[in-house]
Image: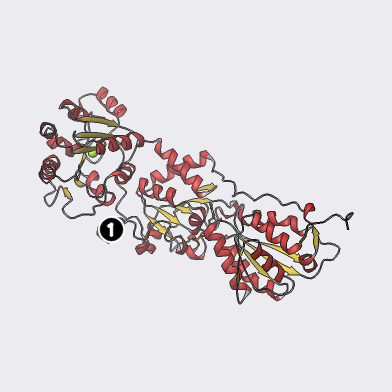
Amino acid sequence: CMSEVIMAEVTGAQLIAEALKSQNVEYMFGIVGVPIIEVAMAAQAAGIKYVGMRNEQAACYAASAIGYLTGRPAVCLVVSGPGLIHALGGMANANMNCWPVIVIGGSSDRNQETTGAFQEFPQAVRSSIYGRPGASYIDIAGDMVNAKIDRASVRFVSCCPAPPVSQADSREITQAVRLLKAAQRPLIIIGKGVAYARAEKEVRELVEVTGIPFLPTPMGKGVLPDDHPNCVAAARSRALLQADVIVLLGARLNWILHFGFPPRFSPHVKIIQVDLCAEELSNNVRAASALLGDIRAVVRQSLALQSTLPMNYYTAFHHISELLPKDCIIVSEGANTMDIGRTMLLNYLPRHRLDAGTFGTMGVGPGFAIAAAVLEQTQKSAQRVVCIEGDSAFGFSGMEVETICRYKLPIIIIVINNNGIYSGVDPETWKEMEKMGDMTTIAPPVTLLPEARYEQVMSAFGGRGYLVRTVEELCSALQESLKNTHTPSLLNVLIDPASDRKQQEFPWLTRSNL
Ligand code: ADP
Ligand code: MG
């Protein structure tokens, strides 16, 4: 009749489904029965994929795995009583794994005390993914499933955004980086929290710029590939026992990691722990450095701090290896430069690496590079010759740069300059020593002139010389040199004179030793 207002009605089940959909919940696993059949049907109608399972426990395992894999919770839909009890196993597993999941259980019809269930959806999504992820439960009274209300009176809460990201205290970061730099046998443990945090890019950079070996937990596997040169999974027990500083990323010192206790771990091990759950910090072993925050953010913080320090071998080689074409010919000599370069600069083709060789001869680099470049020129192939020299090694045949320039061979020479043989001193220390008297009695025999401008040897003969101190300068100079196919160039890369290779307590760090 005309006077009657046409009311758009919506059922409780539809509201649940639409609220879930508006929270970007895409999957539902469950076993239907009274009173939640309509909830599953409404979910499908709203565009949520519904998978009917055979036991609520498996349904909850499935829903929680979606939460881990996507970072957004899925729903496990169960009936009251036995259905919910079966789901408890899955909820407990999700909680222990720190994986988000929303369990929706139908229950008997409302009594007076029930609160407005629909309002609880956004909260459930939020509590499942904010803070430490886990299970959350919503109880739906049976009579609400089919109860109808006016759509106009429904208010959906807007989609719950991804969890806010928190950083660690910057002083704690400084302390942690200091601890890590002082470590003799550092180890990074990669847990499933890193996978959940999607921090693979940041953690790879951390591993590669520091050269530190890593060990994945069972579900931390694959965050970085198992065949990564720094993966020490094949020597797990030894790595755990010998490490003096461990960076614990998104993993707990529980039974999987032998609680962090001796005899599996050194009693003196220092733990740098990164976790977003404050209660987890210092669990079982008191953390030497407790970094409360999101793994991605915290690893970025520590990378930013490290990049303000002078580069070390690992940082320089990490960025060089990112830019070198796979088919380039690598000529290398030096002590640390050649050793560390061997593990970090990969070769993909035969006869594309020339170095100090059987006799360990220093001074072979420029000659080898000239030969390779002349061959390239005759064969009209476009492969580049990159000659990576220690500063001492470069000294033996540095004047061949004139030959290189005379024939316009587009060789790229990279001098990894640490002011000495094995290691040197910084310019300030050098000046102090000069004030003290006769340098022939004072200067350590391993030292060379600090910050010697080897790049000017190249510019002296018309090639391009680059003085490089920072990662940015390194990358732009190398990119420019690779683009320029007519002119030779020399990058004088000043690194921390105290930079040394990590002690070879992890011989498996180099894959050639595996
Ligand atoms: P594993 O089984 O691989 O050792 P655990 O489940 O024991 O991993 O530990 C994972 C840890 O990661 C948990 O303590 C959890 O609080 C934490 N975690 C999960 N996501 C993040 C994140 N984004 N940032 C920091 N820590 C996280
Ligand atoms: Mg040197």
Q: Residue at x 78, y 52 (%)?
A: 152
Would residue 205 appear left or right of 93 to someone viewing this image?
left
Residue 183 location in percent, x, y?
Answer: 39, 47
- Quarter assignment of residue 500: top left
Residue 494 location in percent, x, y?
Answer: 29, 34
Would residue 300 appear left or right of 398 to someone viewing this image?
right
Q: Residue at x 85, y 54 (%)?
A: 5
Q: Nearer the viewer, residue 24 or 299?
A: 24
Which quadrant is home to the N terminus? bottom right
Say whether residue 450 is visible: no
Q: What's the residue type where badge 1 is placed?
A: Arg
Say whether residue 322 is visible: yes
Q: Residue at x 18, y 50 (%)?
A: 353
Colour mapping used in the image: secondary structure
Q: Which residue is mark 1?
A: 511
Q: Residues within 10 Å of mark 1 (few under 14, many from 20)?
A: some
Q: Residue at x 27, y 62 (%)?
A: 514
Q: In this rendering, is residue 474 above or below 51?
A: above
Q: Nearer the viewer, residue 74 or 185?
A: 74
Which secondary structure lies at badge 1? Answer: helix
Q: In this rendering, is residue 255 above or below 445?
A: below
Q: Nearer the viewer, residue 439 or 381?
A: 381
Most distant residue in the front direction: 2
Residue 153 location in percent, x, y?
Answer: 80, 52
Residue 501 location in percent, x, y?
Answer: 29, 46
